Amino acid sequence: MKNNWPIWEVFIRSKNGLSHKHVGSLHAADAEMAIENARDVYTRRSEGISIWVVESKNITASSPADAAALFEPAADKIYRHPTFYILPDEVKHM
Amino acid sequence: MPAEGKTIENADLLKAFQERIDRDEKIEPKDWMPDAYRQTLIRQISQHAHSEVIGMLPEGNWIPRAPSLRRKAALIAKVQDEAGHGLYLYSAAETLGIDRETLYQQLLAGKAKYSSIFNYPTLTWADIGAVGWLVDGAAIMNQVMLTRTSYGPYARAMVRICKEESFHQRQGYEILLTLVRGSEEQKAMAQDALDRWWWPSLMMFGPNDAESVHSAQSMAWRIKRKSNDELRQQFVDATVPQAEVLGLQIPDADLKWNEDRGHYDFGEIDWNEFWSVVHGNGPCNRERMAAYQDAHANGAWVREAAMAYAEKRQMRKNETTGKIDLQVA
């Protein structure tokens, strides 16, 4: 099939102060139409005040096969968490 | 994209996959999965999407004839939701490596199934009440279960759909409530709608567990978390008291409360009717397919024009900025 509309990923900011969050995807001829369609599909009940659309082909995702190499090194670095450090009870709330 | 034919499978991978499922981990698009799991999901999610789309037809039928502006606005909003739900589901299916156009073509060619319930006609306004109450009610039973399905994108689509659908069933029930409080004719119309929609609604849960070919594997993979018969029983138990509030009679002589089981007993479904509708011989199968094919064909020029317009605008933009688009050049 020629001329199929490309696929876009949609991100919605639900209110100011919160970040845009991925909500799903849709097909549209261009970015402007993607915004209009996202408004119709993903904000019918006031879910958002701002929309980002990114053509899906522009997103590069990490591979699940690399998950260990990427994320496991963080697992044994418990000294990055505040609970690693022992303080006397007299010191409250630090 | 993981669509390049068969996945490499071996016992270790399969075992690790099943262990993830058993730990109730969600499977995400790029994770390894058995090819049969992928194909089962593509089939189920796309059937679900097609059902949302075809499901707009029997209700859209009554939008121009809704009895008040309030009812019309609610019905338009409901039908618009169904379009959105179709889209969420198509998007979820696409994460499995099949493209939208292929899914459309499967439905257009009559190769893909959609829920048989939409092959029944909406003859009176009371049918819109019965569809919301019973058909959406039955769908919600299934969809609430699917919010916990093992495939992440499907589960997330279901969460959004369930949130939105909660008004669908209520608006249907409200229509019937208004009718049963009206004239004798209106009450009779409500009863007639229940008489015609009750059994097809029970059929929505599919064949009995013993007859259901895909059930056991789908349960093991936690795509489904309850069996057809469990969901059907849950629906009957929830719906009978609601019929009593309406003062309507459920058309089943065998329906009665079973103290020992703590559930309602109910009569045998006419499975000949079920299979006949599944195989294309329901009251509206041909009409629904023709309406869908017409809409798709009549919309073709719009889809092409939108794409041509987008390309033209992109070209102009490149000319003014002096950029050369290699794809176009």
Image: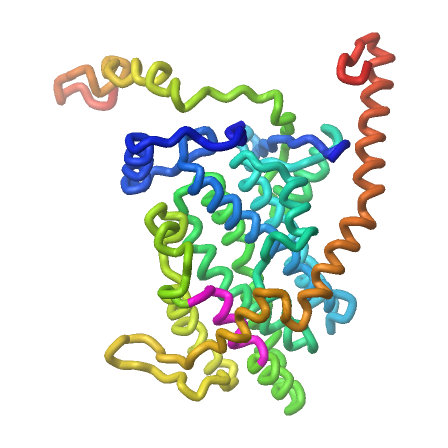
In the displayed structure, would residue A8 be above or below residue B55? above
Q: Which secondary structure class fits the magenta region best?
A: helix
Number of residue marks: 0
Viewer-proximal residue among B135 and B241? B135
In the displayed structure, would residue A58 be above or below residue B125? above
User: Is A6 colored magenta in this rendering?
Assistant: no
Which quarter of the picture shows residue B236? Answer: bottom left
Q: Please name the residue shown 74% across and 29% down the image.
A: A30
| Magenta residues (range) | B196-207
Q: Quadrant of the C terminus of chain B?
A: top right
Q: Quadrant of the N terminus of chain B?
A: top right
Relative horizontal placement of residue B212, taking residue B61 as reference (left or right): left
Relative horizontal placement of residue B184, taking residue B198 as reference (left or right): right
Viewer-proximal residue among B42 and B61? B42
Residue B249: where, in percent of width, then height?
A: 50, 86
Say if residue B169 shows up in the picture.
yes
Which quarter of the picture shows residue A79? Answer: top left
Which colouring convention does the figure follow? rainbow
Residue B161: where, in percent of width, then height?
A: 53, 51
Q: Please name the residue shown 73% across and 56% down the image.
A: B292
User: Is B200 colored magenta in this rendering?
Assistant: yes
Which quarter of the picture shows residue A94? Answer: top left
Q: Please name the residue shown 61% across and 72% down the image.
A: B129
Residue lying furthest bottom: B184
Viewer-proximal residue among B157 and B307? B307
In the displayed structure, would residue B134 be above or below residue B297? below
Residue B231: where, in percent of width, then height?
A: 40, 64
Relative horizontal placement of residue B247, taking residue B55 as reference (left or right): left
Residue B126: where, in percent of width, then height?
A: 64, 77
In the displayed structure, would residue B117 be above or below residue B322? below
Say if residue A17 shows up in the picture.
no
